[in-house]
Image (cartoon, helix red, strand yellow):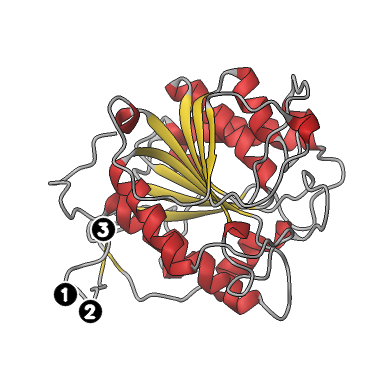
Amino acid sequence: MTHPSIRPGAGALGLPAAEVGPVVSGALAADAVILGLPFDAGVTGVPGQRHGPEIFRKLSPGHAWSLDAHGALGGLIDPTTGGPVLEGRRVFDLGDLGAVPIDPRVDRAAYYRALTGLAERLTRTRAVPLFVGGDHSLTAPVVTGLAAAHGPVRLVCFDAHCDFSGRPMPALADITHGDFLGHLLGAGAVTGCELYGVRTLLPGSCGPLPASLRCTYAYGFPEPADPVAGEPTHLSIDLDVIDPTEFPATGHPEAGGYRLRELLAAVEHVCRTRRVVAVDLVEALQDDRENRATSATVSALVLSCLRALLDDHDRGGERDR
């Protein structure tokens, strides 16, 4: 008999759904969890990113997983390799933090505080949380929570923009989706930031850029040097890194971006070669013409991250967390 909190097939990608409480208390063991963040109050331009988790769940493919008595997955094979997919892994969709529409009595600071605390509690379990946003300001409270559990973390980010400003931002409530890196660096929550896919200019008033912030376009599949490879790492994927001809449903599209296959290969490499302790995918915009394609893209990225993090391949068994 499965855990009473588990609802088979009720989550995104046909995954089992579960409640947050049993996971953070340790009553329900998980290898990875998905949590939606329907929040876009940190956007300075076009809103609608709050619908990202809803679009992802409603239109994601419903894979026919099987579950054993402990909630471990089975039932799927990859026809290109003949091997099982996420076999024996416990992956649960925990629903959303908040709902659409957001209660107007919940201000930005309160939401960020709640997310910081939940990110810390989740990362203290053995599960890797995957957060689906929502706007990119949400990365700041997530990383702040990770740092409370792990100490300062390394940030690997795929983004068309360098979301940095040198202006003083002493509190999380001061940030936006376009400048949250300045807060994280100033607060000491990150040891360094690697940004890939950057192809826009930054106003001179935002600089100078600190030495710990490295911006480039090409990922290049680097072999991270020790001790960087062993640092707890947060992977952040802003969907505007994808070329808008393939992914137009984002608030600030920039021409000349990654193709989806390029991005999938890059994030899989990060997940396989770094000690990734959490992932976020942000900035999917509500667009009735594009919702099905949006969900397909987010679904492909989520499943690729899960497989890169959890499928055995050359890991030789349990992941060293």
Side of 254 where 236 appears, left or right: left
The residue under the point 65% across, 48% down is 161
Residue 170, given in percent of the width and then of the height, sits at 74, 19
Q: Give me the residue at 44% from left, 34% from top.
A: 123
Percent position (x, y) of residue 70? 27, 53
Residue 104 position, x and y percent, is: 87, 46
State the residue at coordinates (17%, 69%): 83
Q: Decide if residue 289 is on the left or right side of residue 47.
A: left
User: Which corner quadrant holds the N terminus?
Assistant: bottom left
Q: Residue at x 57, y 18 (%)?
A: 188
Rendered view: 103 above or below 144: below
Q: Report whether 240 appears left or right of 259.
A: right
Rendered view: 167 above or below 132: above
Quarter of the image for the C terminus: give it. top left
Q: Nearer the viewer, residue 79 or 243?
A: 243
Mark 3 or mark 1: name the one nearer the start of the chain: 3
Single out the mark in the foreground, 3 or 1.
1
Kind of residue sitting beneath label 2 = Pro
Residue 107: in sight, yes or no?
yes
Task: Tell which tag, 3 or 2, sits nearer the viewer.
Answer: 2
Earlier-in-chain disc, 3 versus 2: 3
Q: Amino acid at mark 3?
A: Ala
Residue to which mark 3 is pinned: 69
Mark 2, residue position? 79
Q: Position of residue 317 (x, y in %)?
A: 15, 46
Identify residue type, mark 1.
Gly
Residue to which mark 1 is pinned: 82
Q: In the rendered view, tell whether residue 265 sits above or below residue 273.
A: below
